[in-house]
Amino acid sequence: MVTPSLNQNVFDLVEYVMENKVESSINLYRNLVKIGNQPLQINAILIGHVRLLIQTIILSNLGYSQGSIAQKLKVHPYRVKLSLRESKKTNFSFLKKLYMELFNLESELKSSNKDSELLFEMFILKIVK
């Protein structure tokens, strides 16, 4: 049995957040931390994933093809394909809000002594409402 990579787990985590699956989001985050992943590392991958979604939406709206987007962003075409598919399930303003809240979460993770799980739970609740 092969355990999913951190990137795959974070991909699932983003899906849970975007689908307002609070309990699933928090449980997966806790499991990621429990198996040794650092909260800042998880957050950085979340930010990167959401940024890619935003960039693919913008470039797609400007008329770029899937291949052109991959070249412009210097990412694998399959990641662009998945991002374009995922971007159809959400709206752009939600992604912008999610991106900004992830930045705020990163700042809090770096500057406070609060428990990372608690900070993540507060982030999830802010996003869902």
Image (cartoon, rainbow, N blue to C red):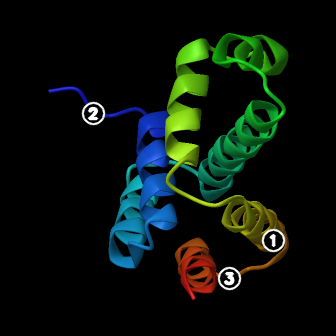
Instruction: Give the residue displayed 54% in from the left and 25% down from the top.
Output: 81
Task: Spot the residue most to the bottom.
Answer: 129
Comes first in the chain, label 2 or label 3: 2
Between 110 and 75, the one lying in front of the other is: 75
Instruction: Give the residue displayed 34% in from the left and 76% down from the top.
Output: 23
Between 109 and 55, the one lying in front of the other is: 55
Residue 49, given in percent of the width and then of the height, sits at 64, 42
Image disc number at residue 114: 3
Task: Spot the residue most to the left.
Answer: 1
Give the CA separation, mark 2 to mark 3: 29 Å
The amino acid type, in three-letter code, at marker 3 is Lys
- The residue beneath circle 1 is 104
Residue 32, given in percent of the width and then of the height, sits at 42, 53
The amino acid type, in three-letter code, at marker 2 is Thr
Other residues around mark 1 within 10 Å, as few (<14) / some (14–19) / many (≥20): few
Relative height, residue 63 to residue 50 (above, below): above
Q: Is residue 120 left or right of residue 12?
A: right
Give the CA separation, mark 3 to mark 1: 14 Å
- Depth check, mark 2 against mark 3: the one in front is 2
Comes first in the chain, label 3 or label 1: 1
